[in-house]
Image: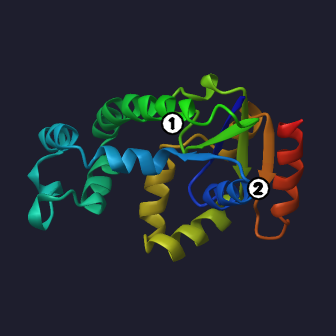
């Protein structure tokens, strides 16, 4: 079984690409969803509150992700500390998930910061979903209702599209003009082979 990392910067469409792989019957592990689930653990939430303060808690004592994101992306040290807390837990979750998917020719691990987290080396192949920055910003504005300034502030913590392209084994172009499904189908056939 091949372990395939799927990455791309914010707004690149990597979740859409992951959904297409899923439609072809490929198991997909969504690292961002796994990370969100970690914040639901009481011991993790307690550590996050100790790190970021009680203002990250909304009504009922639940995490307000928007407030936490605003604080973390404004403070590189806090973002690093949060990543140090969450990334090992997500890796452990992925390792457990893998055990129940060994019968497949390959699996996909979708993660926005695969290279930045140092986890890319754990994969047999890496796919990068490439998208021009202006197109990505337009998509994020529409999807997340963030300002261009907020988007650019978050993007500065990602490696550039160009760097990720050079470090990846395969590139899927999702520029809004090029058809994506044929690219994914071709990769699917290659990875099964």
Which residue is pictured at 75% across the width and 40% down the height?
165
Colour mode of the rendering: rainbow
Q: Position of residue 171 (x, y in %)?
A: 79, 45
- The quarter of the image holding the N terminus is top right
Q: Residue under label 2, please give it.
A: 24
| 47 versus 73 height, above or below | above
- The quarter of the image holding the C terminus is top right
Say what secondary structure mark 2 lies in: loop
Q: Nearer the viewer, residue 134 or 85?
A: 85
Q: Is residue 66 left or right of residue 137?
A: left
Which residue is pictured at 20% across the width and 41% down the height?
48
| 48 versus 123 height, above or below | below
Q: Position of residue 161 (x, y in %)?
A: 68, 46
Q: Would you say the residues marked 2 and 1 are in contact, meaning their CB atoms lie under 8 Å apart?
A: no
Q: Nearer the viewer, residue 176 or 137?
A: 176
Which residue is pictured at 18% across the width and 44% down the height?
52
Q: Quadrant of residue 177?
A: bottom right
Q: Nearer the viewer, residue 108 or 75?
A: 108
Give the CA distance from mark 2 to mark 1.
19 Å
**Which one is earlier in the sequence, the residue at label 2 or at label 1?**
2
| 175 versus 94 height, above or below | below
Q: Quadrant of residue 189?
A: top right
Q: Residue under label 1, please give it.
A: 97
Q: Is residue 171 left or right of residue 137?
A: right
Q: Residues within 10 Å of mark 2 (few under 14, many from 20)?
A: few
Residue extending furthest toward the top: 121
Q: Position of residue 191 (x, y in %)?
A: 83, 38
Q: Is residue 37 left or right of residue 112?
A: left
Which residue is pictured at 37% across the width and 32% down the height?
89
Say what secondary structure mark 1 lies in: helix
Q: Residues within 10 Å of mark 1 (few under 14, many from 20)?
A: some
């Amino acid at each position: 079984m091949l372990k395939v990392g799927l990455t791309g910067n914010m707004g690149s469409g990597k979740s859409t690409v992951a959904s297409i792989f899923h439609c072809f019957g490929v198991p997909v592990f969504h690292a961002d969803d796994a990370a969100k689930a970690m914040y639901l653990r009481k011991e993790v939430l307690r550590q996050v509150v100790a790190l970021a303060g009680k203002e990250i808690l909304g009504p009922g004592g639940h995490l307000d992700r928007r407030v936490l994101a605003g604080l973390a992306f404004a403070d590189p040290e806090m973002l690093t500390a949060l990543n140090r807390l969450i990334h090992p837990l997500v890796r452990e979750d992925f390792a457990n998930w893998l055990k129940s998917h060994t019968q497949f020719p390959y699996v996909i691990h979708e993660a926005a910061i695969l290279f930045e987290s140092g986890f890319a080396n754990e994969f047999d192949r890496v796919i990068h979903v490439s998208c021009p920055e202006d197109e990505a910003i337009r998509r994020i504005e529409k999807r997340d209702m963030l300002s261009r300034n907020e988007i650019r502030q978050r993007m500065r913590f990602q490696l550039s599209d160009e760097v990720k392209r050079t470090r990846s084994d395969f590139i899927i172009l999702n520029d809004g003009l090029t058809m994506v499904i044929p690219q994914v189908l071709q990769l699917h056939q290659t990875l099964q082979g």
